[in-house]
Image (cartoon, rainbow, N blue to C red):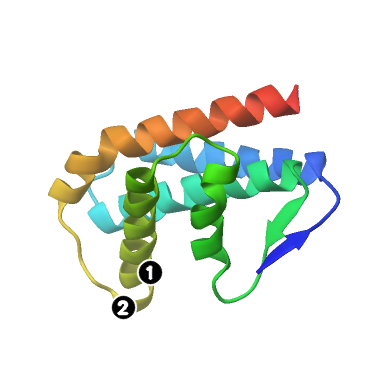
Amino acid sequence: MLHNVFPDKEKAKSIFKMALEREKFLLSKIDYPNIIIENYYEVIKGLSSALFLLNGIKFIGENAHKEIINNLPKLVNFSAYDISVLQDLRVKRNYSLYEGKQFYVSYIENYQKFFDDTIDKLKKMLRDKLK
C-alpha cells in the first residue's frame, strides 16, 4: 500500500548505503545462485525504496515489494519488459527464501547485465537526488 510521507533524506541515505554494501557482496562472485538472486533483489529493492522515500512515498503491507516494482516507472524510465524481469526476480527471490527452491547459475548469467544496469541506473538517480 502506497503512503505519502515526508521525504526522508537521512533514511534514504541509510538504505542506499545498505544497498551498496549488498552490491559489494555480489561483486565478490560467490558461486551460490540463490544467494546471488536474493541479494540482487535486495539491492534493487533497497535502492528503489530509498528513491521513493526521497519523493515522499513509502510502501507498506503484504504487497509492498510488488508495488515498489510496479510503481518504478513513475520515477525511472523503465519499460514494461524491465518491470516484468524485476517482478520475476522478486518471485524467484521469494521461492528461494521461503520455499528453498534452487536456481541455476544460467538465470544469473542471462540477467546479470540487466540487473547490474538497473542497479547503476538507480544509484545514479539516488546520487543525483542526494547531492
Image-based side of 17 in relation to 69, left or right: right
- Residue for point 65% across, 25% down: 127
Residue 29 visible to an observer of this rendering: no
Does 5 appear above or below 128? below
Image-based side of 62 in relation to 89, left or right: right
Residue 31 visible to an observer of this rendering: yes
- Residue 88 % position (x, y): 32, 58
- Residue 31 % position (x, y): 22, 46
Image-based side of 21 in relation to 118, left or right: right
Which quadrant of the view contains residue 38?
Answer: bottom left
Of the pair 40 and 70, the residue shown nearer to us: 70
- Which residue is label 2 attached to? 99
- Which residue is label 1 attached to? 94
Which quadrant of the view contains residue 30?
Answer: top left
Which quadrant of the view contains residue 64?
Answer: bottom right
- Residue 114 % position (x, y): 31, 36
Please state which amino acid type lies under the numbered disc 1.
Asn
Q: Residue furthest right?
A: 6
Does 90 appear above or below 46? below
Q: Mark 2: few, some, or many residues within 10 Å (few <14, many ≥20)?
A: few
- Secondary element under disc 1, as helix, strand or loop, is helix
Quadrant location of the N terminus in the rendered image? bottom right
- Residue for point 73% across, 53% down: 57
Disc 2 and disc 1 in contact, CB within 8 angstroms: yes
Please state which amino acid type lies under the numbered disc 2.
Glu
Image-based side of 58 in relation to 49, left or right: right
Q: Mark 1: few, some, or many residues within 10 Å (few <14, many ≥20)?
A: some
- Residue 98 % position (x, y): 38, 76
Sequence-wise, the earlier of marks 2 and 1 is 1
